[in-house]
Amino acid sequence: MTNLLYPRIYVNTLLDIPLDKLRELNINAFIIDLDNTITEWNSNEIRFEVEQWFGLIKSEGFRACILSNNGEQRIQKVADRLGIPFIHRAGKPRRRSFLSAVMLLGVNSDQAAVIGDQIFTDILGGNRAGLFTILVKPLARREFLGTKINRTLELFVLRHLLRNVSPKDGFVR
């Protein structure tokens, strides 16, 4: 069960994701969480560097979509600005929504990586679906109450995880 909670990579932000190494692993699509990964919680504001990162990945041939438990209207605004598709009310960590995102992106499961800031939704769901997973640190401390509770539990997993993270590229050994 513990392996389902561990990402393959753990980095500070989207900007630290080793795109060249992922390309070597034949990863060419990203399924990305919204809150505290692309935007701060409950916000439609996209940081300049995050918007640039999306431009970079698109220019390098990566595909992306947003997978979020949020409602459609909120996600639509961010997805339209980034020019990517989305799946709303995903029910993460259920596998079905992750596999739907793979189909939406038109790739095989071994070509997609899940990127998110939460172990018990993004990483657990991605791992359960057999996808490559990348954990990023949350963009901000402000969060939904349920997420704050999960963060307390995540601390136990993070303690063990940090012992196995390569400082060079974020890969978990």
Image (spheres, rainbow, N blue to C red):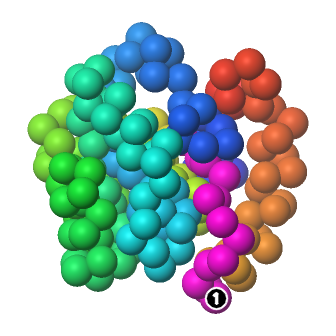
Q: Quadrant of residue 28?
A: top left
Measuring from the top left, give residue 7's x and y in whole percent: 60, 42
Residue closer to the observer: 118 or 35:
35
Q: Quadrant of the C terminus?
A: top right
164 relative to 139, above or below: above
Q: Quadrant of residue 11?
A: top right
103 relative to 113, above or below: below
How crowded pointer 1 is (Cα within 10 Å; few <14, some 14-19, many 20+) is rated as few
Q: Across the whole image, how many numbered discs are drawn on residues?
A: 1
Q: Write the residue at 42% across / 37% down.
A: 53
Does residue 119 appear left or right of residue 124 in this picture? right
104 relative to 169, above or below: below
Does residue 151 appear left or right of residue 101 in this picture? right
- Is residue 66 something one can see in this rendering? yes
Q: Quadrant of the N terminus?
A: bottom right
Q: Write the residue at 19% across / 50% down.
A: 83
Indicate yes or no whether the magenta region holds residue 141: yes
Residue closer to the observer: 127 or 28:
28
Measuring from the top left, give residue 115's x and y in whole percent: 47, 47
- The residue identified by callout 1 is 145
Indicate yes or no whether the magenta region holds residue 11: no
- Is residue 3 something one can see in this rendering? no
Q: Which residues are magenta?
A: 134-146
Residue furthest to the bottom in view is: 145
Measuring from the top left, give residue 58's x and y in whole percent: 26, 31
Q: What is the chief secondary structure element of the magenta stretch?
A: loop
Does residue 102 appear left or right of residue 144 in this picture? left
Measuring from the top left, give residue 106's x and y in whole percent: 12, 38
Residue furthest to the front in view is: 48
Q: Callout 1: helix, strand or loop? A: helix
